[in-house]
Image (tube, rainbow, N blue to C red):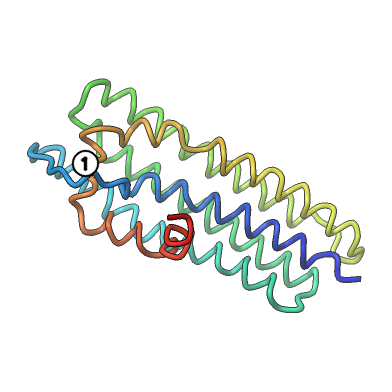
């Protein structure tokens, strides 16, 4: 019985939705207009430079889980890969939250509130991945049916996480902040790495 493979595929699909969260912060919804405010540009550079390596880690973790779906992996291999991936993602979101926190409030209306909400959201996402890591480590790899069921539950939680997770981030990078971010080379490369194929296929 090869119950884990299709389930881990579902996990990978849910995870690729989660990787979009960071890309929301990359300012890749470019409008092409330039941000003249130097202070805002410097804020955007600080955040973008910090986000880029973390976004690559998240994309790498997502790829690792997807790779486990294409091979004929044992439950033990799937568990190990998924656990490491969730750990990586938890650490990466925490680092992004710390970077947004360290950058201070962007110089826009309600900048401090937007920044605070985004940091809280990033920390919440980090905590959610840490919880998923514990759950995947607790799964019974000796019973493939139970293991597959457990993965299904985790995939459902990932789905929720990827659809509900980034309102505050979108709010933070609306308007001038987003424009400033699109001017940063590191944000441009964040938006192309990892999710280029996804954006190409979705238009």
Q: Residues within 10 Å of mark 1 (few under 14, many from 20)?
A: many
Which one is in front, 166 or 98? 166
Residue 192's image quarter? bottom left
Q: Is residue 99 above or below residue 192?
A: above
Which one is in front, 161 or 46? 161
The image shows residue 27 at horizontal and vertical percentages of 30, 46
Residue 199's image quarter? bottom left
State left or right for residue 181 relative to residue 41. Answer: right
The image shows residue 121 at horizontal and vertical percentages of 47, 34
Residue at 57 percent across and 39 percent down: it is: 163
Quadrant location, the N terminus: bottom right
State left or right for residue 103 relative to residue 80. Answer: left
Residue at 40 percent across and 42 percent down: it is: 97
The image shows residue 13 at horizontal and vertical percentages of 63, 57
Residue at 86 percent across and 70 percent down: it is: 2
Element on which disc 1 rests: helix
The image shows residue 59 at horizontal and vertical percentages of 48, 62
Going by the picture, which residue comes out furthest to the bottom?
72
Residue at 77 percent across and 64 percent down: it is: 6
Residue matched to label 1: 179
State left or right for residue 6 relative to residue 142. Answer: left
State left or right for residue 105 relative to residue 10. Answer: left
Q: Is residue 105 above or below residue 10?
A: above
């Amino acid at each position: 019985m090869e119950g884990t493979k299709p389930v881990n595929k579902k996990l990978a699909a849910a995870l690729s939705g989660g990787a979009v969260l960071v890309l929301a912060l990359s300012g890749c919804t470019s409008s092409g207009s330039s941000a003249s405010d130097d202070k805002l540009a410097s804020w955007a550079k600080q955040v973008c430079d910090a986000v880029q390596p973390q976004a690559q880690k998240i994309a790498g973790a997502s790829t690792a889980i997807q790779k486990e779906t294409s091979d004929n992996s044992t439950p033990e291999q799937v568990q190990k890969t998924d656990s490491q991936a969730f750990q990586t993602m938890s650490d990466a979101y925490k680092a992004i939250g710390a970077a947004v926190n360290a950058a201070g409030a962007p110089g826009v209306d309600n900048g401090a509130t937007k920044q605070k909400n985004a940091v809280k959201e990033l920390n919440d996402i980090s905590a959610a991945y840490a919880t998923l890591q514990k759950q995947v480590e607790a799964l019974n790899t000796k019973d493939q049916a139970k293991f597959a069921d457990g993965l299904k539950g985790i995939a459902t939680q990932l789905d929720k996480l990827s659809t509900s997770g980034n309102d505050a981030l979108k709010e933070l990078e609306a308007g001038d902040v987003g424009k400033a971010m699109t001017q940063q080379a590191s944000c441009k490369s964040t938006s192309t790495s990892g999710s280029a194929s996804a954006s190409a296929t979705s238009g």
